Image (tube, rainbow, N blue to C red):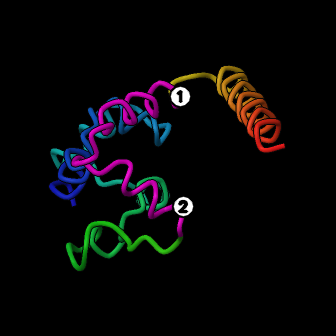
Amino acid sequence: MSERIKLLRKTLKLTQQEFADKLNIKRGAVANYEVGRNQPIDAVISLICKTYNVNEDWLRHGKGEMFLPVEDEVGEIVSKLVDESNPFYDLIIDIMHTFNNLDDKGQEIICNFTADLAKRIAEKEKKEDD
């Protein structure tokens, strides 16, 4: 499993710290998993699978595909956005990392700003259509 955790992290193009931060675990724990010093407990395995849409059978046993199939429209859109062939890939990843590293209040401010901006754009478009 240690090699698969490292492969997953590298496939996601994350540092050990970034991978750990998203899971709310310590970087050292990730390092220990990757070198096989420690095995993650079931709760951490479940968290990795949920957070990164990973096939648990692949993570535990190396069977099947690394990622679960994308089943919904939003997931498919996100999958396309984070595809390396997308010319905005680096920008999107930077935005996601920056947002993820904000505290709850910072994330709330960004969400409120974005909602207000979307509302203003919709109002402007409505006036133009009238």
Residue at position x 40%, y 35% from top? 92
State the extent of the magenta-drawn residues as a range.
73-100
* Magenta stretch: includes residue 94: yes
Callout 2 secondary element: helix
* Magenta stretch: includes residue 55: no
Picture quadrant where residue 63 is located: bottom left
The residue type indicated by label 1 comes to Phe
| Viewer-proximal residue among 32 and 78 | 78
Q: Is residue 25 above or below residue 75?
A: above
Of circles 2 and 1, which is in front? 2
User: Is the C terminus in the top left, top right, bottom left or bottom right quadrant?
Assistant: top right
Left or right: 59 as drawn, with respect to 48: left
Q: Which residue is mark 2?
A: 74
The residue type indicated by label 2 comes to Val
Residue at position x 20%, y 58% from top? 4
Q: Which residue is mark 1?
A: 99
Callout 1 secondary element: helix
Residue 12, position as x, y percentages in the image:
28, 46
User: Is the N terminus in the top left, top right, bottom left or bottom right quadrant?
Assistant: bottom left
- Mark 2 and mark 1 residues within 8 Å of each other at the beta carbon: no
